[in-house]
Amino acid sequence: MINIIWMVLLVGGIIIGVFTGNTQAVTDALMSNADTAVELSMGLIGMMALWLGLMKIAEEAGLVKLIGNALKPVMKFLFPDVPKDHPAMGSMVMNIAANILGLGNAATPLGIKAMKELQDLNEEKDTASNAMCMFLAINTSSVTLVASSVIAYRLAAGSKNPAEIIGPTLVATIASTLAAIVAVKIFEKFSKNKKTKVVANDTLVTSKED
């Protein structure tokens, strides 16, 4: 589906560019953004190598376990299906911590690693588990207390007060995160009720056949 959406956007942009006489602008944009994509990919490789290495050091030093224990009550409520000592829990804790500090580039490799580890726990490989949905929702809601990356961008752009976004960021992130958690928990409840009804019906049918 994503491939189809991107194809529609790409073809639509080219067609509109031709009909509006902006073919050269479309060509220039394609070439410049292709260079940007390569630079971004190469930079992400280095960032993933760095933070995955630091993650491994943190695991061996016991830092991840320490942070996990501190956040245990919250993480247990959000991810009841994930064992407390599973590597996925540590990856999620570090990912959320990086997002809280506004380090989006650092959070990306940790988030990818956490998703892979959650998939290992997932019994239905073709369907996202509740833990995967919750983790994705929290990341999508943009948990950020200090938007350090945005502050750096504003400073580079010449802002006189780059840190003034901290207040609005706190309000926005609290609202979006609470909304994401409540939505996932509601859908989890409906999903459990649906599975219970299916199991009950199957049991009823089996008993009749017997």
Image (cartoon, rainbow, N blue to C red):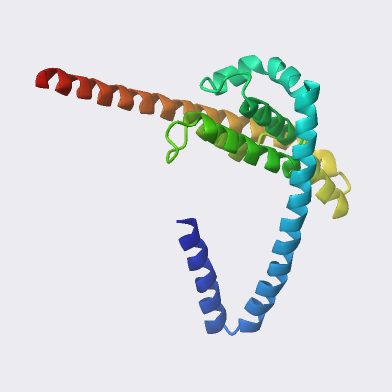
Q: Which of 181 and 70 is in front in this view?
A: 70
* x 62%, y 37%: residue: 139
- The quarter of the rendered structure image containing the C terminus is top left
Considering only vertical position in the picture, is 152 above or below 36? above
Q: Can you give x and y, in whole percent of width and height, for residue 163 in the image?
A: 83, 40
The one of 104 and 121 positioned closer to us in this rendering: 121
State which quadrant residue 151 falls in. Answer: top right
Direction from residue 88 to residue 7 in the image, left or right: left
Residue 37, compared with residue 86, is above or below; it is below
Tell me if 196 is positioned left or right of 5 in this view.
Answer: left
Image spot of residue 174 (x, y percent): 64, 30
Instruction: Where is residue 76? Give x, y as percent.
Output: 58, 18
Name the quadrant containing residue 94: top right
Quarter of the picture holding the N terminus = bottom left
- Residue at the image position 57 percent from the left and 79 percent from the top: 17
Residue 98's image quarter? top right
Q: Which residue is drawn at 48% across and 32% down?
A: 122
